[in-house]
Image (tube, rainbow, N blue to C red):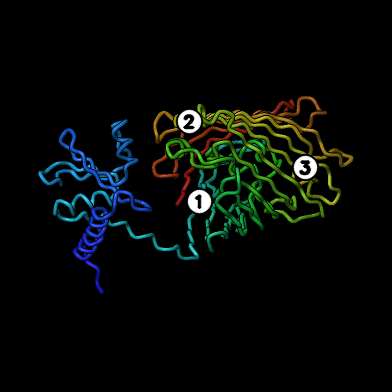
Amino acid sequence: MKVTQGFVRSATAVVVAVLMAAAAAAPLHAAGPVLFYEEVEKDGRIYVFNTPERLQIWKESGEMGAAVTLVGRGANGETIVAENEVAIDMYLFKHNLPGYDRPTAPPPPPPPTYPQVKVGGLAYLSYQNGTTKGVDYSKVTIKRGYILVNATINSFFGARLTPDVTQDDTGDIKLRIKYAYGQFKWAKSGFLTKPNVEFGVAHMPWLDFEEHVNMFRMQDTMFMERNGLFNSADVGVTFAALLGPELDDTYKKAVSSYYPGKYGSFSFGVYNGSGYHAKEKNENKVVEGRVTVRPIPNQLPGLQVSYFGIAGKGNTEKEPDWLVNTLMGSYQHKYLVLTGTWYDGKGNQSGSAVDADGKALERDGWSFFTQLRPTPDWSVIVRYDFFDPNKDVEDDGNKRTIVGVAYEFAHHNYLLFDYDRVDYEKSGVDADDRLQLTLQVSF
């Protein structure tokens, strides 16, 4: 049988008639609950009640609270304010007025269909002109070319596959796997929001986080990766989550939607230790972890303090020590990004940072980065790095200065012009410098 609005109004009228008849017939002292109805006219409005408690509250406070309001639907065109839908139906029936059509609830969204696959791409295409080790060069190069394939397989499991196109020093263009992992994910676990586990060629805990604070990976790698300490992915397992609920949409739209935990985020993992583009040369496993906190999220949500550590062995058969201790303070705002990074450690991922006896070198350094964003499209970036590759040797450090101007001509698509210079403390070693124009293509 087809149910029409007319049928619903008729059925409602019958029910209301039965209720009002029962109310009229009920003895004053009948056992059980007694039906109640009262209407009060005040200030050109008619207030309708079907419970004595709400009537009493209204008389004492003048407040209706949650109510159904129909403008101009009274017997003489008054506005009706009823405590609920039953009260409005009783009023309309009593005065022989048309029934109250309930707003039709929107249909529930259809259940998601799986799998859901998204394909995108990211490339850094550069013209470079400069000098390195005293040799001039001028070239157009493909710094990186990523094919981004992300799949949501069901409500709790997804996957990512990212081939990486790069051009080596010989000019050969190579294809390798940057990420290839399955990811288990769920909405919440107590204080943790969006916890997830990656298994396979997975994110290491640090660089993905730093590169979503300093968004100019297109210029070149970040401070610690630039000095050969480690890269961004490795074969292993990563567990990560946000701390507390997410920041509000205003912050995420105006500043950053990455790692938006109100109180911070974390990432921990165990890996082979060779990185994603090297063969594992020993049986050692490397433990890595990052903890980030927002100390005053209500007043300065963009302020974060992060610690990152690595404990393991370098990727050689001799297994030299590889230790990393890093602190970073960062601040993100609509018009400004600031980071300050301090590093102290031993050795490196490849196991090459050793002395003549194979002992890991003790090393340290620091970096400062700022992005000024006077308009939504234009940015000015400045970065200064200092790195000491061996604390036991005097005057062997290097100092890097980067200055650039970027124009975002489409969402995440940039043109960046920058100057990059490295000065060496060791006497007799010429500085390296480079002018670069980079096109970032993102879709």
Residue carrying label 2: 333
Categorize mark 1 by other alpha carbons within 10 Å: few (<14), some (14-19), many (20+).
some
Q: Going by the image, does 412 lie left or right of 392?
A: left
Circle 3 or circle 1, nearest the eye? 3
Of the residues shown, which amino acid type is indicated by label 3?
Answer: Ala
Q: Can residue 373 be seen?
A: yes
| Residue drawn where x is 15% and y is 55% of the image | 98
CB contact under 8 Å: marks 2 and 3: no
Q: Amino acid at mark 2?
A: His
Give the Cα distance between marks 2 and 1. Answer: 25 Å
> In terms of depth relative to the viewer, which is nearer, 362 or 173?
362
Instruction: State whether residue 116 is above or below residue 377.
Output: below
Q: Residue at x 47, y 44 (%)?
A: 439
Work out which quarter of the rendered image holds the N terminus and state it: bottom left
The label number, if any, that marks residue 311 in the structure image? 3
Return the x and y of residue 442 as percentages of the image width and height: 46, 49
Q: Amino acid at mark 1?
A: Leu
Q: Is residue 275 above or below residue 44?
A: below
In front of the other: label 2 or label 1? 2
